[in-house]
Image (cartoon, rainbow, N blue to C red):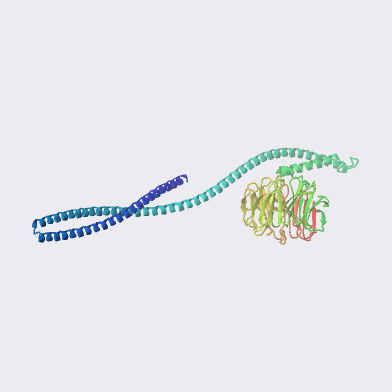
């Protein structure tokens, strides 16, 4: 670029010098031309004077000859003297000679002046030719200057385009470097977490082995105690609550179950005779409540203190998780379609059909922020892992990221001109998964604000629900085609597990809001269907989808939402058409 600019500047300087020289030559030639015109006028006047002189000389000489001749004749006649005649003739001849000499001189002078005129004319013609040549050169220089100017403008446009492309390329490189650094940092953090988890697992395995020994000993003691009770060898109450051995047995049983679920150990031979169902998913409805309003959505709080219900009467209610009685109530301008708690259970959000997202502080029972950036229905929203951000998806085909502390909009993602039906944020990183009406599932990096991956045609109909497992390793998706897919985070090319049995499971086609949800351990998936049934599937790579529970409990309409309690022992479900919620235990 610099070499091209310097070359162009040198060429322009040379052109300016040539133009200055041409201008000075033209001025000098103009002066010479004016002088030549004056000289030719002077020469013409001299010729006219010369011609007049010649005529005067001839006339005078004729007059003189005639007068002398007459005088000589008169003298000859009067005096008869021939000598006087001779003298007069001599005088006339002398004057005639002088006149001839003068004429010769005038003629020579005229010839010399004619020669000079011809020389000057030739010089003038040469100068005229040079002027024409210089004019042609000037035209060429002007044409070259115009072409150089046009080329310069084109090169400037190209340079601007190249600079814009270079800027975009640098930004892409910067984004890729940042993404790479983030990925490396996440990988490093995951390695550290994995090491910590492995240590915890080893410790839990050791604790479990010790507890197994204690549990076996306690079982033997309990069996001996039961045998003694049957034989009448003991006295007093035999209730479990008053028997210390029985209490020890149940305590050990609980500790074993929790350690076993956390360690995820596989020792079927040792645990074959120890079948506990304390933390297994529920199998029956413990409580069902008819509501005067239609519930759109339900959600368990992570602290197990509340159950949030988004209602058609423009209210979000917090219910007691044991009795389903109202405890707190928040108002909206339109019906709530999705409610979510933050990770600490201190905040609850509600999305509305007017495009608003409400965020309330539970303890103070007041509105913290109201976000109104969407211009169409908002059916879904979720908190990130540290509850500092909220992501929302709308029918306006955008995903927006809000700052919970500042109450401000931070980013907007375009979702490929497709309605966002549901979204979920991984708890282990900032990966956001969204389901769309164009049958696709898309993945966005919340930090970088970029689209990372897309699963086109994840379903043959609208994707209505997505949910990450608690460890962020798997993503479950539900479509209007009544297919459930589970994808491995490491490879989104095809689902690792898929369930499709239209005879047993079918999604409601009239509602666009549904849920699919992993249990806290990631071993089970809960989802409702069109027939009013709750489906619970045990999920694993080897076995795929294993039916744990498919049960209907007096629902007249479809089950739209199902939400797990934090310990996985309870599920709350809602039916919009039936205007009721149920607590499964």
Taking the image as shown, residue 475 lies to the left or right of residue 239, namely left
In this rendering, the count of numbered labels is 0
Camera-side residue of 497 and 391:
391
Name the outermost residue toward the right: 236
Camera-side residue of 565 and 286:
565
Residue 104 location (% of width, % of height): 19, 54
Residue 275 location (% of width, % of height): 77, 46
Taking the image as shown, residue 42 lies to the left or right of residue 288, namely left
Camera-side residue of 419 and 483:
419
Q: Residue at x 79, y 43 (%)?
A: 254
Residue 170 location (% of width, % of height): 56, 46
Camera-side residue of 420 and 261:
420
Residue 429 location (% of width, % of height): 66, 45
> In terms of image quadrants, where is residue 255?
top right
Q: Is residue 466 visible?
A: no
> In terms of image quadrants, where is residue 50?
bottom left
Q: Residue at x 74, y 60 (%)?
A: 530
Name the outermost residue toward the front: 78
Q: Is residue 241 visible?
A: yes
């Amino acid at each position: 670029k610099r070499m091209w600019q310097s070359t162009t500047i040198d060429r322009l300087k040379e052109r300016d010098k040539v133009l200055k020289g041409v201008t000075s030559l033209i001025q000098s030639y103009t002066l010479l031309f004016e002088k030549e015109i004056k000289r030719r006028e002077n020469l013409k006047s001299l010729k006219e004077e010369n011609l007049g002189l010649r005529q005067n000389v001839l006339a005078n000489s004729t007059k003189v000859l005639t007068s002398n001749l007459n005088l000589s004749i008169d003298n000859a006649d009067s005096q008869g003297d021939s000598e006087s005649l001779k003298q007069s003739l001599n005088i006339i001849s002398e004057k005639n000679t002088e006149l001839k000499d003068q004429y010769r001189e005038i003629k020579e002078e005229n010839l010399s002046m004619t020669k000079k005129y011809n020389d000057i004319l030739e010089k003038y013609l040469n100068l005229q030719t040079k002027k024409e040549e210089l004019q042609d050169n000037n035209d060429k220089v002007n044409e070259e200057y115009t072409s150089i100017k046009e080329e310069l403008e084109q090169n400037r446009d190209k340079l601007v385009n190249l600079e814009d492309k270079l800027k975009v390329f640098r930004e892409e490189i910067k984004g890729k470097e940042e993404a790479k650094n983030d990925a490396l940092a996440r990988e490093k953090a995951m390695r550290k977490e994995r090491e910590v988890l492995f240590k915890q697992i080893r410790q839990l395995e050791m604790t479990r082995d010790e507890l197994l020994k204690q549990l076996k000993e306690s079982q033997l003691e309990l069996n001996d105690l039961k045998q003694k009770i049957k034989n009448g060898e003991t006295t007093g109450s035999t209730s479990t609550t008053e028997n210390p051995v029985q209490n020890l047995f149940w305590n050990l049983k609980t500790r074993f179950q929790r350690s076993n679920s956390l360690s995820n150990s596989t020792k079927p031979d040792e645990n074959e005779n120890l079948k506990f169902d304390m933390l297994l998913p529920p199998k029956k409805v413990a409580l069902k409540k008819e509501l005067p309003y239609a519930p759109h959505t339900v959600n368990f709080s992570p602290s197990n203190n509340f159950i949030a219900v988004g209602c058609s009467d423009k209210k979000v209610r917090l219910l007691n998780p044991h009795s389903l009685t109202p405890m707190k109530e928040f108002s909206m301008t339109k019906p709530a379609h999705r409610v979510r708690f933050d990770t600490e259970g201190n905040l609850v959000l509600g999305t509305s059909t007017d495009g608003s997202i409400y965020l309330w502080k539970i303890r103070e029972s007041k509105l913290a922020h109201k976000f109104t950036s969407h211009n169409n229905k908002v059916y879904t929203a979720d908190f990130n892992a540290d509850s500092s951000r909220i992501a929302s998806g709308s029918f306006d085909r955008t995903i927006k990221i809000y700052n919970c502390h500042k109450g401000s909009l931070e980013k907007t993602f375009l979702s490929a001109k497709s309605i966002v039906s549901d979204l979920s944020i991984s708890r282990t990183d900032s990966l956001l998964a969204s389901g769309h009406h164009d049958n696709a599932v898309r993945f966005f990096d919340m930090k970088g604000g970029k689209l990372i991956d897309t699963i086109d045609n994840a379903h043959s109909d609208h994707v209505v629900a997505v949910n990450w497992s608690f460890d962020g390793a798997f993503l479950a998706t539900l479509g209007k085609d009544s297919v459930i897919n589970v994808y491995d985070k490491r490879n989104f090319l095809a689902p690792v597990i898929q369930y499709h049995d239209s005879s047993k499971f079918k999604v409601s086609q009239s509602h666009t809001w549904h849920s699919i949800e992993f249990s806290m351990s990631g071993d089970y998936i809960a989802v409702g269907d069109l027939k009013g049934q709750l489906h619970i599937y045990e999920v694993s790579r080897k076995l795929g989808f294993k039916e744990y529970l498919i049960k209907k409990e007096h629902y007249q309409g479809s089950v739209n939402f199902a939400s797990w309690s934090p310990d996985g022992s309870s599920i709350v479900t809602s039916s919009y058409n039936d205007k009721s919620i149920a607590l499964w235990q």
